[in-house]
Image (tube, rainbow, N blue to C red):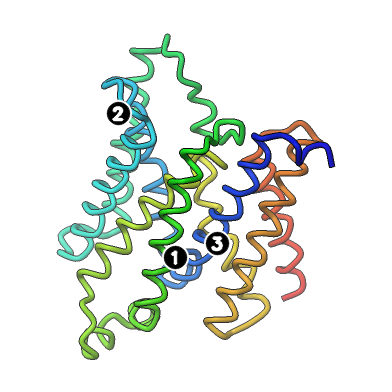
Amino acid sequence: MEILSYTFFQRALIGGILISVVFSLFSFFVVVRKLSFAGVGISHTAFGGIALGILLGINLSISAMIFAIIIAVFIAYTSQKRRLHEDAAIGIFFSFSMAIGIAIISKYHRTTVDIWSFLFGNITTITRGDLTFFGIITGIVLLYFFLFFGDLILLAFDPEVAQSYGVNVKLHNYFFMIMLGVVVIMGIKMVGVILISAFLVLPATIAFAFSKSFVKIIELSILFSLVFTIAGLFLSYYLDMPSGATIVITGTILFGLTYFKR
């Protein structure tokens, strides 16, 4: 295929594979722990970080990641202290970050940065440096899940039982939310701030229709995520549509088919 000879598409394909693996691992725990709204909140807070990056003249991915991590820590802190319900905390930080982003970008509307690509994704913006970053994060995530898979399963279903087994629940919650923030930044260039939450929910939701085994669901999540990501990339090229939107549409169609099966 001629498309495979293009450097931008090769990078998008490699990036898509790495993102699919990482998001599929998180997808299971996000769905089981009902953290879908947390994924939405963290992804949208990245918009505030991008705007601050424009204002300060620093790397936008770095500013977005720092901002997302700070918000993720605040969400974990407020929910664990039980001073504020988790959904309320996410809603507040989500709105605050978007407001900052809108305020800054409206004031500096002449910026040369393509805001559209951050909001909805653009595969042509993926660089070799991005792939290096994706590879490092993928390695860290795989190591994290390999070392603490049992603890994370216990935490997902019963934090009190996990604590009785000696699991450091607070530390795991903080680290999980921080890693979620980093992973969200990973996917922004592929599907954008607005659509990234679908990547956190679709893989596991589709996989749940085929198995009740934890390990099998995660394996199927990775498989289905790879299928709709790669298919979406090819379709976006041939249909001349935005890559992020096409990937999410493809994944949603796949979910629809499995829903009727179930």
Can you give x and y, in whole percent of width and height, for residue 83 in the image? 15, 60
Give amino acid for label 3. Val
Q: Pick whichever, 176 or 208, lies toward us.
A: 176
Q: Residue extending furthest top?
A: 110
Q: CA distance from mark 2 to mark 3?
A: 32 Å
Rendered position, 242 above or below 147: above
Residue at image coords 33%, 13%:
107
Q: Nearer the viewer, mark 2 or mark 3?
A: 3
Give amino acid for label 1. Val
- Which disc, if any, is residue 21? 3
Q: Earlier in the sequence, mark 2 or mark 3?
A: 3
- Which disc, if any, is residue 100? 2
Rendered position, 103 above or below 86: above
Which quadrant is home to the C terminus?
A: bottom right
Instruction: Check disc 1 and report the residue beneath it.
Output: 30
Residue at image coords 52%, 82%:
214
Rendered position, 88 above or below 32: above
